[in-house]
Structure formats: C-alpha cells, structure tokens
Amino acid sequence: MASAASVSPINKIGQQASSAERFFQWSLFLLLLTGFGSLASTGKLDLLSLAVVLPALFLRGRQLARGETFVIPETWTNYLTIFYFVFYAIDYFFLSQGFVSATVHMVLFIMVVKIFAVQRDRDLLYLAVLSFLMVLAAAVLTVDTMFFFTFSLFALAAMATFVSMEMWRSERAAGVLGSVPKRPGLFHRSLSGMALLLAVGTLTGSVAFFFIIPRVNSGGYLRSMGVQSEMVSGFSNTINLGGIGKIQQSNLLVMHVQVVSGRLPDDVKWRGVTLQDFDGRRWWNPQPSVATTHLLRNAPLELTQLKADGALLYGGSPRVRHVPTVSYRVVMEPVDTSVFFLASTPTRMSGPYDEVAISYGGSVMLVAEEGRRLDSYNGESDLRDFQALARNSTSGDYPAAITTRYLELPDLDPRIPALAQQITASSGTNYERAKAVESFLQQTFGYTLELPGPEDDPLAHFLFERKKGHCEYFASAMAVLLRTLSIPTRVVNGFRGGTYNDLNGTYMVRGRDAHSWVEVYFPEVGWVTFDPTPAAPAEAAPVGWARMALYLDAARQVWREWIINYDFSHQVRLSMQIGTKANAAEGKVRFWSTLKYGSLLRYFRRWQGSVRDFSIPHVTFTIITLLALLALPFLPKIVQRIKRARILRNPGRAPSTAASFWYLRMLRIVSRQGFSKSPGQTPLEFAFSIEDPVVRKSVMAFTEHYRRARFADSADDAKLLPGLCEDLAYRK
C-alpha cells in the first residue's frame, strides 16, 4: 500500500479536494500571478513573453475554477528542458544579448512548463521559487512604486501558500485527504485572515528593519544589471547627428530637480557634455578627453577655479567673477549615464561619490566605482545672462588652447561659408555675428522631430534643402557657421527646462526635454550660451489625467528618495527630523499639561470656596449623589445578587433556578471534603463515584431532590435543598 506522503500533489479529475488543498492550489496560482504581475509592471517584457505566459496562466486559472487537471508527461518535460538549455545560449548571445533578459525568459519558460507538469511535492516548491525569481527580476529591472504594491500582494500570496501547504501536507500525513469541513467558507476566511495578518506583520517588521539597519552605500547589489540604456548614445564622447533627436522622442523620466534656494528660469539649460570636433556627420572629443580628476566624497568642489591648459574651464575669463544665484539638488532616475547635468554656468557641486572626472569642455563625469551608479548630487550655478557683457566684445585675442580646440572644420560644402558671410555682412563685432546667425536660424528654419534619412552631407542638406530639423541640427549649423568666421564655438548636449510638479516642488526632466545648444567664446567674458533652435510653445497647466500623473510622480519621488536612495545620510536626516518633531511634541504636551493643571487648581480653589458655604443638607445630598454615581457601574451585579439572595432564601418561588444555585454550592462543599466532579460526569455518575458511603448517600439524596426541582420544577424538593446542603457542610 502506498504511504500518504506518496500521494500525487494534484488530485485527479473527479477526486474530491479538501478545503486546505483547494485553498493551497489557488494561493499558489495567485503567487505565480503576482510574481508575473510584478515582472510585467516593469514594462520590460517583450510581446512574445506576454503572448506565451498570459494564455498559460489563464488556462491554469480556468482549470482551477472547473476542478480540472492537465499534466504534461514527465518525458516531454525532460525534452523541453534540454531544448531550452540550447535555446538559452542562443537567446543570451544573439537574441536578448543580456544576462537579465535571457534569464527572465528562461524563468518564464520553466514556469509555463511546470504549472502543467506537477508530479511531486518538490515541483510545487519549484513553482514558489520561480515566482520569487520573477519578483527578484522585477526588483532588478525597476525602481518604481508599483513594485512595492505588487510585492505586498506577493507577500500576502506567499503567506497563504505556505500556511495552506503545511496544512494540506499534515492532512495527507494523517490520512484524511479529501475531508471537507462543515463550513468551508468560514475555513477559507479564517485562513485568509491569518495569511493577511502574517503578511502585514512581515511587511511592517521589514519596513522597521529597513529604516533602522545602518546604511553605507545606496548603489546596491543587482541594481546595476537592470539600468536603462536609452541615454547612452546621446551623452558620450562620440555622437552622431540624430542622437539627441532620438532621445527627444522618448517620454522617459531622466531626473528630478529640487530648488534649494534661488529660482530656475523656464528655459534653464542642464549642461551635460560638450563636443569639440565635427566631421560633417558626427561630433566627438579627441582622446584623452579628461582634463582633470578630483576627489568628491561629499565635500563641495569649486568649479570656477578649475583650469585646463592654463584656461578656466567654466566661464573662461578671469575678468568675470561668477557667484551662485541658485542652489539645487538632482535625483537621477536609473538611466545608464555617468554625466552630471548641471545648470549653466556651474560654480560648485557635491555628492556621495569618491571621484569625478572633468573634461576639457567642462563636462563632469563619475569615475567608475564598484557597485556605484549616479543617483543624486547637489549643485550651484550662476544663471545670469552673460550676453550683456559680451555685446561690446571686439577682441580676437583668443588663448592658444581655445583656437586649437574650437576652430577646427572638416571639408565643407562651399555654400556654408558663403552663407555665413551673407548672414553677418552688416555685423561689426563677433557678438553681433553670433546674434545674427542665431536669429537667422530661429526665424528661417522650421522645427521637427522627424529624423531625416541617410544623407552624404546632413548639415548642407539641412541648411539648403530640408530647412527643418531638431535642435541638434540648429546647434551644429550655428557652431559650424561661426567657425567659418574664425569664432570659437562648441556644441553642448543636455536638457532644457522641465515640468514643474507643485505637489513636491520638483522639476521633472524627461527625454523629450533633451536639447543641444551652442557656447561661443569671447575673450573679455569667456564662454557665452546661444540657442538657435526656435522657441517651443509653452506647455499648458496639467489638468485631469495629466494632473493625476503629477500625484503619481510625487509618490515615485518619495519612493526613490526614501527607499531606493536610502543611505546613512538619509538615516541621519530622518533621526534629526524625528528628534525635532519629538521635542516639539513634548513641548506642546508639557505646555498643554501646565495649562490644564493650572485650570484644575483654579477650579478646585473655587470649588473649595463654594464648599465652605454649603449647608448640611447640601453636603448630605452631594455625598449621596457621589456614592450613587460610584455605585452605578456595579448596579447590574448588585441587582443580580439581590435576586439570587431572594431565590436562595425562598427556593419554592423559582425551583429550577434555586436548584442550580444549591447544586453548585453542594459541589463546593463536597470538593472541600476531597470529592470533585469532573466536567464529563452527570450528577448521578458523580454521586455514584464518591467512595465515602456516608457522603455518597447524602449526595445521592441531594441529587434526587435536585433533579426533581431542576427538571420537574418541584417547589417541595427545592425547599429541601438548603437543609440537605447544610447537613453536608457540618458532616464530620
């Protein structure tokens, strides 16, 4: 005969399932569903994965609802496993080309096979482990608030699964498989409530430990494996024309900016990378591009004092003193970039990083650290308009480092230099020439995000044929036109503006805010910003669903600030805030207590003075009233005791009730004599069980009268009970 432990985990069709087993099957299904839901909520699953897994889960849910079972033969399972080991290598090297994506595909494939191939108890554990792996993959692929919601549901389903699994296994071990409680609905509700209580307790404890355990580095474990890579091509040392245009077509959230002091203009430019050389198709920086490296480690780095080849990196002229007009904090989303985006002109920055590298063009980049990614940093900038200082610039005495780097040109279409001469024919200074080119491009050309097809000379095609493009073409055109006039220029890629969220006081900068502009060098001032791209229409204030998106963004920002980026500095801030609020609350309580205590003293003084004037009747009435109020809570018990005393004194008035009272008193009397009644004994059984013949005879006589008084409502027998009880009490 097979043992109970060898029973198949899945009942056959027509076999009745116990409530614990059915609850377990549904809990395990919900565990898989929430695990897959957390993975799907990241938005990183491809359509093929969704097309395979969703129908499989739907079919499994349909089978559970109908009580049906479909099991893939074990031989086929082995064949499919061998097949996927081969396919995994193909997926890793040729299709997904990434460890996380290929592994996620493998986990989903194994789950689809396993939910229809459960043969043993360990297969059920495999499914639970697979659901956990899906949640783990979701944690790698996203840092959104949706993950906390799906993880909470996963924790609830996990508690229900493992509790019901243990109950089901205990049922099988006891040989009661198939037993159904008389009230299955109550059983399911009780089990669900227990699982909910355990899940809430686990999450609450986890949150407490999360905030208490000391933090060192917020970079974190597997997070670097799941970063987003849409930003890489637009902010590197080599950028093809069109790279920024691709980013502008994305609604990807890149960073949040919180103003600490000062004010940001609507068109503030977040400076990312500067580009030096142009070959007609792409901009790049020659190697080595790093001018200097500096230790950071949360200490402020003064940028206005940094030099490369004897020239200041920021501003560019010692005649102009830069002072910060705005201070801000930037929190980066998980985008794959090491570039610090700083408002022009940056004067100071700080952050929890060991070392930063600064290029010859003033780009600030994070030096690679083990397990560390760009998360948050602080910056200060001088946002004054320096064009006013450059208006009278007439000098052409450029430093050698400037002319060497920022005047190089490729072979150009002859029409481009001719166009530059034509545009600036009436300009007398380099500033006027720069403004003339800027105005010409803004007023003559159209703006579009439609990327052009491949062209032999994309810049000439933009200027003389297409005459429309996105910001990268406008910036490239202005930089090249001015270089043909021997005016040093460079292209800057970064972001412009952002959407203000009044709920949390931050600016949301998205991929669509990516922008290119031009910096022009004037010896008297240094680098001055120009933007030849036509101005975009102002965005309308968000309403309706757009307003709801602001609430969601505020929640995500809190999640990133206090969960994803939570580190020791946050713990210090949190403890200081808690200490400050606790001290404030203590002060309020102390102040309130002092006021109430003073009021109470004044009241008693007034009352004491009033008591002196009381007459004896008033005092008597007050005492009686106070005693009555004190006795009011005990009034029901007092009434009950009075009724009981009356019944005991006159058993004939309520024979049945009196019999119950006197029988209990009799039991207490014989208990003191060494004879106790067990709960399972009837009165007659107890009487017969007494070993002392004298006591047994008296108790049997009492029991006979008790039964007639209790069940026949005999008043005569009830009247005899007090005397019989008294005889038992005084019996030696």
Image (tube, rainbow, N blue to C red):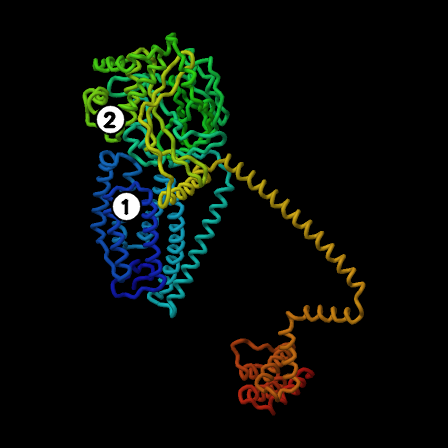
Residue tagged 2: 468
Q: Is residue 718 left or right of residue 125?
A: right
SS for callout 2: strand
Label 1 – label 2 distance at C-alpha: 46 Å
Give the residue at the far front of this rendering: 426
- The N terminus: image quadrant: bottom left
Q: Please state the total of marks drawn on the protein image.
A: 2
| Other-residue count near label 1 (Cα within 10 Å), few / some / many at <14 / 14–19 / ≥20 | many
Q: Position of residue 136 (x, y in %)?
A: 36, 43
**Res. 414 image quadrant:** top left
Q: First in sequence, mark 1 or 2: give its number.
A: 1
Q: Is residue 288 left or right of residue 90?
A: right
SS for callout 1: helix
Q: Which amino acid does label 1 sit on?
A: Leu
Q: Where is residue 512 in the image (x, y as percent from the top left)?
A: 32, 33
In the figure, 138 relative to 63: above or below? above
Q: Which mark is residue 563?
A: none
Q: Where is residue 445 in the image (x, y as percent from the top left)?
A: 26, 25
Q: Which residue is drawn at 64% across and 44% down?
A: 587
